[in-house]
């Protein structure tokens, strides 16, 4: 189907990879615990949308261009790192009374967090290279048109990833709700901000 082979192996590998904690996982956990379930859902949807972008990039060969250009890879990596650090510092430097999305999430706030999650994922070139290396392993080399195969595999990966991320959001937000209140909310914002800065620095210095 669509030139895809060993689909069962792909599905099992996707689930295992999704269960393995990564930068996206910690980003979603940070949002969910510090800002609540709706913010966590927005982040998960943003990350999933970023994965869709990487799927199309791999299918169209854009990821290969990034892999072939050291300058492009470093530029995208540093942009992603800078954005994560910016988000972290904004949370760390926020006034104690400012706790966005602490008790709710307006439409504007939901879209803002969604866009942030999207950018965090899209600006991570390692995700692009992962899709370029992972998806083609399950696509027949003799296929005349590989785009449908990339899209089907990418959609399956996004679906399994989103289900897992939403489970994380549900449980982590419930746990964080016990801590969000009074000084607890400010403390959680500081912790989440520190986590985002750490993730940004780790991305910047990674090879």
Image: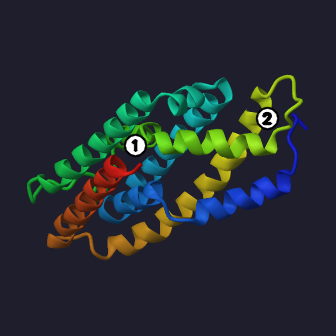
Above or below, 199 relative to 154: below
Give x and y (percent) for residue 129. Answer: 56, 41
Left or right of 33, for residue 51: right
> For the residue labelled by badge 2, is the local secondary structure a helix, a strand or a loop?
helix
Residue at 66% across / 64% down in the picture?
16
Q: In 3D space, how far apart are the residues under numbered discs 1 and 2 (Cα atoms)? A: 26 Å
Give x and y (percent) for residue 75. Answer: 36, 32
Above or below, 69 relative to 116: above
Closer to us: 151 or 35: 151
Badge number at residue 149: 2
Q: Please name the colour scheme applied to the rendered image.
A: rainbow
Badge number at residue 53: none
Above or below, 146 relative to 49: above
Residue at 25% across / 48% down in the picture?
85
Closer to us: 173 or 20: 20
Closer to us: 15 or 162: 15
Residue at 35% across / 57% down in the picture?
31
Give x and y (percent) for residue 190. Answer: 19, 63
Left or right of 47, for residue 194: left
Q: Of the residues under marks 1 and 2, which one precedes in the sequence?
A: 1
Total labels: the figure holds 2
Give x and y (percent) for residue 119. Answer: 40, 37
Left or right of 134, for residue 47: left
> For the residue labelled by badge 1, is the local secondary structure a helix, a strand or a loop?
helix
Residue position for label 1: 120
């Amino acid at each position: 189907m669509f030139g895809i082979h060993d689909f069962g192996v792909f599905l099992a590998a996707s689930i295992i990879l999704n269960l393995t904690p990564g930068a996206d996982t910690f980003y979603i956990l940070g949002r969910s615990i510090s800002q609540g379930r709706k913010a966590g859902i927005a982040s998960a949807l943003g990350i999933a949308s970023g994965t869709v972008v990487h799927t199309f990039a791999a299918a169209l060969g854009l990821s290969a261009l990034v892999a072939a250009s050291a300058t492009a890879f470093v530029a995208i990596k540093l942009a992603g790192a800078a954005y994560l650090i910016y988000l972290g510092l904004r949370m760390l430097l926020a006034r104690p009374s400012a706790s966005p999305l602490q008790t709710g999430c307006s439409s504007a706030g939901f879209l803002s967090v969604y866009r942030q999650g999207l950018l965090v994922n899209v600006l991570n070139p390692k995700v692009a290279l992962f899709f370029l290396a992972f998806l083609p392993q399950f696509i027949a080399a003799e296929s005349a048109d590989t785009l449908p195969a990339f899209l089907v595999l990418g959609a399956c990966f996004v679906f399994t990833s989103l289900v897992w991320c939403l489970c994380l959001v549900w449980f982590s937000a419930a746990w964080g709700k016990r801590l969000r209140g009074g000084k607890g909310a400010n403390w959680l914002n500081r912790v989440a901000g520190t986590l985002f800065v750490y993730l940004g620095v780790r991305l910047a210095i990674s090879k």
